[in-house]
Amino acid sequence: MKHSIIVVLALLLSLTSYAQFQVSASGGYAIGSAGMKIGEIQTVNKTENTYGSYGEGLNTQIRGTYFFNDTFGADLSLGYLHGDDQTVSEINAPGVEVDAVARARAFGAALSLVYKFNNNVYGRLGALVKLGGKTEAVAYQNMVMSDDQAAGLSQAYGTDIPSGSSFETNFVEDYHGQFPLGFVAAIGYEYPISTNFSVFAEAEYYGISLKRKDSEIVEFNTDIVRPDGTTAVQGFYSLNNLPEGTNRTTTYVDEIAPEDNYEGSSKELAVKVPYSSFGINFGITYKFKSASAATTR
């Protein structure tokens, strides 16, 4: 027992005698990897799929790294992703125009082990989680109404709504996901510029997908627009007056019972959306004095 205690104390002493802490800040850009189908583009001639990942876009990170010795360390990072627009639906057909995109606005954290191959090259491998944020869908829709609709609405609102007028809709819907767990791997090169400061560049891979939990329409407006572009009726539909069959909130589940499968139900089957990416980061690191250096002074 005494021998075990001595061994443990000796190990702790050896770790703390070297222990070094450093902080870093970085920014970079990632492209989608393992892209999945996200939406469709439709024209009068064809329909094609769009593929991508919501992990594509700009990101920033702040990291704290604790080295136990001159080779191994542990790293805790916090990051923010400002995702690029991904095409969900694009329709260009007579009487119908749709342009809907979605993008990620997410906060995440990662806990990794760090290994130094030498004084310049290092690698990281660890677990990745999403802490908060959303996938934001922004949509525009223009649908030409029938002549009967135009005549009826013109009479109902007491204003001129000529043939060829359309319903012009803009809305924003926020999607939230369940707590995900993924992994992160990176390899980088660090170059010292002073005793305490160094700069680095690294290639980083995120492997993660997100299962949807719920969504909410946060902005909605439909105007009736004449062919010349002027507005005949403003706010025909709004967030507090949604079109029939449109739910303000939706819950995503793994199973829908027969009694929940009705028109207007706010439940839909859950899907997983991709957030995996491969990116390049550039940053700067500040190294505090190691315990061994402080002891020698």
Image (cartoon, rainbow, N blue to C red):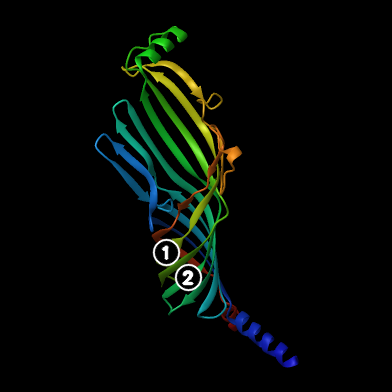
Marks 1 and 2 close (CB-CB < 8 Å):
yes
Where does label 2 land, which residue? 124
- Please state which of residues 129 and 116 is positioned toward the viewer in this rendering: 129
Where does label 1 land, which residue? 204
Image position of 202 with respect to 19: above or below: above
Residue 168 occupies which quadrant of the picture?
top left
Label disc, if present, on residue 261 of the rendered structure: none
Residue 216 occupies which quadrant of the picture?
top right
State which tag comes first along the sequence, 1 or 2: 2
Q: Residue at x 39, y 60 (%)?
A: 279
Q: Quadrant of the C terminus?
A: bottom right
What crowding class fits label 1: few (fewer than 14 Cα within 10 Å), some (14-19), or many (20 or more)? many
SS at badge 2: strand
Q: Position of residue 192 (x, y in %)?
A: 42, 72
- Kind of residue indicated by mark 1: Glu
Q: Position of residue 292 (x, y in %)?
A: 58, 81
C-alpha separation, residue under disc 1 versus residue under disc 2: 9 Å
